Image (cartoon, rainbow, N blue to C red):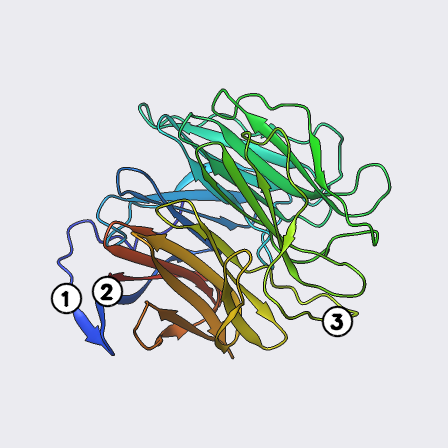
């Protein structure tokens, strides 16, 4: 188990105001680990997962990220992939919490937590063709009807990376036959950028970096029938990035209160915000953007030269600390940012 020097369940936190941002805490170290991910649930809780060696950890915050429970073991996956945004991902429904992860052989697994009992299930495979998720990029989302939808980069058939997905209607215990969501006519989608999912009702969105006609741009696939079929993915933004290498940066995706997709991503050395069919808006020099939204107010986080920044609408960006790969969640009027810094999971919380 982790040394529990990090828990703050009874700590009264000061409030800091910096450049118009009202911090409930400016930053703290939570635990040793890699690639933390946070999401918010419908009750305002914040759920955190991260990997450390072959162990998948989980922690929960009932106060908007100001304090977290001691990280507990959700599952052990030998040869867990947890590097370059390839770590465990997390989703939640009313009854279950689900964490998905990939091993180095290229298999996607899921373990679920019953929210009523707190019990974790064993890890179960999602991919129905073995060892096809070699790149390790995947994501998962829960929907209001209790379903989970997973997506990953998959080599089946032609050894070219494509988007493949599956759906579980029993809380992640069993999964549908895998279906190909998209394959690039140029051969492969970008093989080293993370995927992002978001859902509202029957609308499922998947954002990915395509590799099409020599360009590595962000695209958004949309299903209006709960993942049964997907439209032809739509390119995001007006510009393009001709690149004969991989940028290692997949950006982030969120939905507004009305269900409109909003995205953040990098092209060349700039982080942009964009919605489908609209021109992109330059935010800052940087990379590895994350986005979350509450009441139509998107919050952004990214890294620039090893420094983590956060920005609310109509306010200047502020520094959270040093590190990489920030992820972001919003619960009500509170935003939580987590990131990795020298093998440690760190977090900061600010009022919206």
Q: Which residue is mark 1?
A: 14
* Distance of label 2 from label 1 (alpha carbons): 7 Å
* Distance of label 3 from label 2 (alpha carbons): 41 Å
Q: Nearer the viewer, residue 186 or 9?
A: 186
**Can you give x and y, in whole percent of width and height, for residue 166 in the image?**
62, 30
Q: To which quarter of the image does residue 54 belong? A: top right
**Can you give x and y, in whole percent of width and height, for residue 333 in the image?**
23, 54
Q: Secondary structure at mark 1?
A: loop
**Can you give x and y, in whole percent of width and height, for residue 349 in the image?**
28, 61
Q: Earlier in the sequence, mark 1 or mark 3?
A: 1
Q: Report how many numbered discs are placed on residues in the image.
A: 3
How many residues crowd around disc 1 within 10 Å: few (fewer than 14), some, or many (20 or more)? few
Q: Nearer the viewer, residue 265 or 12?
A: 265
How many residues crowd around disc 2 within 10 Å: few (fewer than 14), some, or many (20 or more)? many
* Distance of label 1 from label 3 (alpha carbons): 47 Å
**Does the image show residue 109?**
yes
- The answer to whether mark 2 and mark 1 are in CB contact below 8 A is yes
Q: Quadrant of the C terminus?
A: bottom left
Q: In the displayed structure, does residue 228 sit left or right of residue 331?
A: right
Q: Which residue is mark 2?
A: 25
Indicate which label's residue lies in the foreground, 1 or 3.
Answer: 3
Indicate which label's residue lies in the foreground, 3 or 2.
Answer: 3
Q: Earlier in the sequence, mark 3 or mark 2?
A: 2
- The answer to whether mark 1 and mark 3 are in CB contact below 8 A is no
Q: Secondary structure at mark 2?
A: strand
Mark number displayed over residue 242: 3
Q: Residue at x 33, y 40 (%)?
A: 41
Q: Quadrant of the N terminus?
A: top left
Q: Earlier in the sequence, mark 2 or mark 1?
A: 1
Q: Residue at x 71, y 50 (%)?
A: 135
């Amino acid at each position: 188990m982790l040394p529990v020097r990090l828990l703050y369940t009874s700590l009264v936190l000061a409030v800091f105001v910096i450049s118009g941002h009202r911090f409930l805490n400016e930053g703290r170290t939570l635990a040793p680990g890699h690639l933390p991910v946070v999401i918010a649930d419908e009750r305002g809780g914040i759920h955190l997962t991260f990997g450390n060696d072959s162990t998948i950890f989980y922690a929960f915050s009932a106060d908007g990220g100001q304090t977290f429970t001691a990280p507990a073991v959700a599952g052990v996956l030998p040869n867990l992939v947890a590097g370059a945004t390839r770590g465990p991902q997390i989703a939640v429904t009313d009854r279950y919490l689900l964490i998905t992860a990939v091993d180095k052989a290229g298999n996607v697994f899921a373990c679920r937590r019953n929210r009523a009992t707190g019990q974790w299930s064993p890890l179960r495979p999602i991919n129905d063709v073995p060892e096809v998720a070699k790149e390790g990029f995947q994501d998962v989302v829960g929907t209001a009807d209790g379903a989970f939808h997973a997506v990953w980069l998959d080599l089946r058939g032609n050894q070219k990376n494509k988007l493949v997905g599956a759906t579980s209607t029993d809380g992640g215990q069993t999964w549908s036959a895998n279906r190909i969501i998209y394959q690039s006519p140029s051969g492969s989608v970008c093989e080293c950028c993370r995927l992002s999912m978001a859902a509202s009702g029957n609308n499922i969105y998947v954002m990915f970096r395509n590799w099409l006609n020599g360009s590595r741009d962000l695209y958004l696939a949309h299903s209006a029938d709960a993942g049964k079929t997907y439209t032809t993915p739509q390119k995001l933004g007006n510009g393009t990035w001709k690149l004969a290498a991989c940028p290692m940066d997949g950006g982030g995706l969120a939905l507004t209160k009305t269900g409109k997709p909003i995205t953040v991503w990098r092209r060349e050395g700039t982080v942009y915000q964009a919605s489908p069919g609209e021109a992109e808006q330059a935010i800052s020099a940087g990379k590895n953007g994350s986005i979350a939204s509450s009441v139509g107010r998107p919050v952004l986080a990214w890294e620039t030269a090893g420094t983590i920044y956060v920005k609310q609408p109509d306010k200047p960006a502020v520094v959270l600390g040093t590190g990489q790969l920030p992820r972001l969640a919003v619960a009500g009027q509170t935003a939580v940012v987590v990131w990795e810094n020298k093998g440690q999971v760190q977090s900061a919380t600010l009022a919206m």
